[in-house]
Amino acid sequence: MKGTKVKLVIATIKPFKLEEVREALTDIGVRGMMVTEIKGFGAQSGHTEIYRGAEYAVNFVPKIKLEIAVSDSMADQVAEAITSAARTGKIGDGKIFVLDLAQAMRVRTGESGEDAL
């Protein structure tokens, strides 16, 4: 990786916040991300719903998972942009994790490290 530091920012957000978060990240120069529809639970611990007159426990709540590889110097800015765009102030707003990436490589060119982003 030629000594360049790359971080992986993983965030879970509420589905209806995806477009706002995407715009906030684009505004700060993020050029790509991976988006996955997931289900999970945290402090919410799910909820109950009524379906055809019967009550059901919904133990997993729909979420969106974002994975964004960025240079080390951008990681804090990315986390801040996600936080401000995704926050509703209610339980279940999500989480952000920042990890060191051992390697990043662009398949087409073979570029690695920050050059691969």
Image (spheres, rainbow, N blue to C red):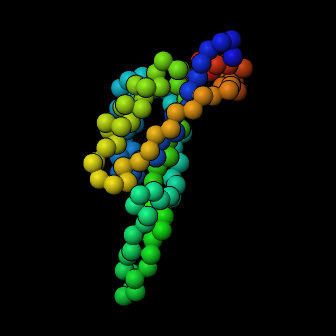
Please indicate whether residue 20 sits to the left or right of residue 72 in the image: left
Q: Position of residue 60 (x, y in %)?
A: 48, 64
Closest to the observer, 12 or 100: 100
Quarter of image, res 78: top left
Outermost residue on the bottom side: it is 53
Compared to 21, does 111 lie above or below? above
- Using the image as rendered, state which of residue 77 and residue 25 is in the foreground: 77
What residue appears at the point 53 percent right and 25 percent down from the top-left corner? Answer: 70
| Residue 50 visible somewhere in the drawing | yes
Q: Position of residue 7 (x, y in %)?
A: 56, 27
Instruction: Name which residue lies at 65% across and 12% down.
Output: 3
- Identify whether 21 is placed above or below 28: below
At horizontal 59% and vertical 18% (from top left) the residue drawn is 5
Residue at 43% over, 64% down? 45
Image quadrant occupied by the C terminus: top right
Residue 32 % position (x, y): 51, 31
Asked if residue 20 shows in the view, the reply is no
